[in-house]
Image (tube, helix red, strand yellow):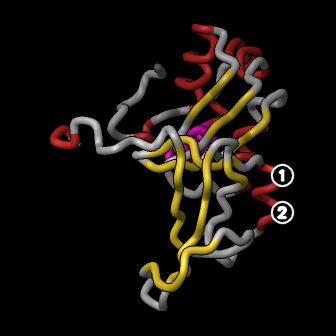
Amino acid sequence: VPDMDLTAPATLTATALAEAVDAVDATLVFGSPAALANVAETRSEVPSRCREALAGVRLLLSTGAPVPPELLREVLQMMPSAQAHAPYGMTEVLPVADIDLADLERAGSGNGVCVGRPVPGLTVAISALDAEGNPTGPIVEERSVTGEVCVRAAHTKQRYDRLWVT
């Protein structure tokens, strides 16, 4: 775990991330968009000894909020061998879908947030939204529909685990 305040993702610096990657020869990095934004902002401060470790990263994952493609591109400058993905899920069922950087860029912006293609083994449907953003109308399984995501999967939790802790 990088040297940071885990309750404040934006405290993650590029140097702290690089040192954590170097300490365990990590090939996968996971960070929220808030954490990655500060990593990108502080990337020029990474010591040269840690830059080699970042070059060994093969997969960059960011989830928890929509992640701008340009942010992923900035972070990938530090990880030239990595692929970037933004998996999507919900507390009660994870993962639901995945999108890589190329597809995220192709999707563009302006009509909701593209979360990618469903992972195998689940059914995804969409409920259209009214003007206030509330689900309304029939639930459909068509592609390229903007709305509330509805999921059926064997790995869906029946209830929240230890809800009283949250």
Q: Is residue 135 magenta?
A: no
Q: Is residue 24 above or below residue 95?
A: above
Q: Are marks 1 and 2 in contact (CB under 8 Å)?
A: yes
| Place of residue 29 in the rendered image (x, y in percent of width and height, measured from the top left) | 62, 28
Q: Is residue 69 above or below residue 93?
A: below
| Place of residue 117 in the rendered image (x, y in percent of width and height, measured from the top left) | 72, 53
Name the foreground residue: 120 vs 163. 120
Residue located 69% across and 42% down the image: 120
Q: Is residue 25 above or below residue 5?
A: above
User: In this rendering, would 89 be left or right of 18?
Assistant: left
| Place of residue 23 in the rendered image (x, y in percent of width and height, measured from the top left) | 58, 8
Q: Residue tagged by mark 1?
A: 102
Q: Secondary structure at mark 1?
A: helix
User: In this rendering, would 140 be left or right of 157?
Assistant: right
Residue located 83% across and 27% down the image: 81
Task: Please name the amino acid that badge 1 sits on.
Answer: Ala
Residue located 70% across and 12% down the image: 49
Q: Quadrant of the C terminus?
A: top left
Rate crowding at label 1 as few (under 14), some (14 to 19) or many (20 or more) other CA atoms within 10 Å. Answer: few
Q: How many marks?
A: 2
| Place of residue 63 in the rendered image (x, y in percent of width and height, measured from the top left) | 55, 46
Residue 106, numbered circle:
2
Rate crowding at label 2 as few (under 14), some (14 to 19) or many (20 or more) other CA atoms within 10 Å. Answer: few
Task: Please name the amino acid that badge 2 sits on.
Answer: Arg
Q: Which residues are magenta?
A: 34-42
Name the foreground residue: 79 vs 153. 153
Name the foreground residue: 77 vs 133. 133
User: In this rendering, would 56 be left or right of 135?
Assistant: right
C-alpha gap between disc 1 and disc 2: 6 Å
Q: Is residue 39 magenta?
A: yes
